[in-house]
Amino acid sequence: MPRREFKYRLSIFISSVFISELIFWILAWQLLRIFGVFSNQGAGEQLTFLHEKHAFWLLLVPFLVLVFTYQLYKRNQLVEQLGNIKTLRTFIRPVSTIGVFIRYFLIRNAIVFAAFALMQPALGTKAIKGTSSGVDLIFAVDLSNSMNTRDIKGGETRLTVAKRAMNQMINQLSLSRVGLLVFAGDAYPQLPLTADIEAAKMYIDELNTSFLSNQGTNVAAALDEASRFFSKENTKKVLVLITDGEDHEGGMKKAYAAIHKNNIEVLILGIGTEKGGIVPEDDTPEALSLKDEMGRAVISKVNLPMLQEIADELNGEIILSNESFPNISAFLTHINRSSATNTVDLEFQVKENRYQWPLGVALLSLFILFIWESIPKKQESK
């Protein structure tokens, strides 16, 4: 029929799209498998994606298929609704199903490979040089039940505020490495010193008083563990002790000596109020209060004299806060001052970002599309 030269062959377009997508993704899967993307124990160099979250942009491909299919369908409907062939030849040009498929294929390639570029594929490593602040910082965090007390303005728990303060310090400081230890009745390493700041923040966000069954507030154990936790490297060592300081279990003189011996600077963040608050059984808002042997609700008060004694013995700075966002500017100033005078040269290996490869394919597809659209088309259907 002469009218067919003005209509797209929709079934051919859809089947071509389906077959081309099937072939593309099978080949892509095989290629990614060869480079070890789906294996944790692949031999040799492995391809990884630094920002896998951008994979959602690939969902634009089925959307693009729907858009093209709908437009072709509406075009075919318009041809059916118009009059005779003479009218069609006057107002509408013949179309090419192959041509529109090529246009689709180039556009989808630009989208797919741009998405891969955003995901930042990394293959191999490269050596880079840089400088670091030369400051290692360890947080020693009190996870005793009293840290669930809600005597903070706004009704938040002391531990919630402690985690917020730690994240604030990490975000605003230039540090070599960050470590984390937790304590209650005893002290335990939680995260060894690492340059992976995002990992440190993840560990901080997951802290909970249920981590430790041996309750208490053994500050001496925290200080003693911290003195062993730092590396032997020539870096500035800063310990941030975060606690309500409600009680301690002795052994402080030995702990003080260990801190002095290892040249560790100590900053103390006391969280809570001296008036205190009821200690709940857990960190949920509806939790019942803990009871003492007499059946009375347990009250936790910040032990400011004890915190001040620690600061005096270790020549440290102390901040006491019951705010949702503690003012830790004094700590930031102290650590930044240390950073300025303790820089070290580093050489380390980082993953080689290969985003240029898929980005180049995406740009090439757009360039070919531009050339294709610029070529005059023959007035015939295909």
Image (spheres, rainbow, N blue to C red):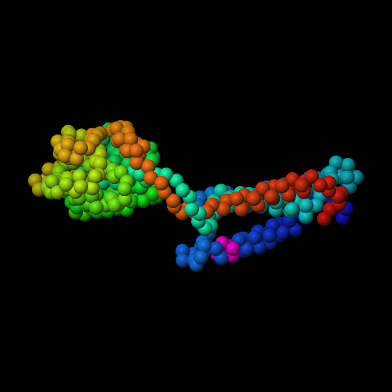
Considering depth in this image, is 331 or 156 the residue closer to the camera? Answer: 331
- Is residue 123 magenta-colored? no
Q: Is residue 227 depicted above or below 40 in this figure?
A: above
**Residue 308: x, y in percent?**
17, 36
Residue at point 75%, 58% (across, down) = 12
- The mark total stands at 0
User: In this view of the protein, can residue 33 be seen by the observer?
Assistant: yes
Residue at point 38%, 49% (across, down) = 195
Q: Quadrant where the C terminus lies?
A: bottom right
**Residue 266: x, y in percent?**
24, 41
**Residue 1: x, y in percent?**
87, 55
Residue at point 72%, 59% (across, down) = 16
Magenta stretch, overall SS: helix
Query: Which portion, as a residue range, is magenta?
Result: 29-33
Residue 16 located left or right of residue 47: right
User: In this view of the protein, can residue 281 be seen by the observer?
Assistant: no
- Is residue 30 magenta-colored? yes
**Residue 125: x, y in percent?**
50, 56
Q: Looking at this view, name the residue that lies furthest to the right.
A: 86
Residue 195 located left or right of residue 95: left
Considering depth in this image, is 218 or 138 the residue closer to the camera? Answer: 138
Residue at point 86%, 50% (across, down) = 378
Image quadrant in which you'd find residue 213: bottom left
Q: Looking at this view, name the residue that lies furthest to the left.
A: 294
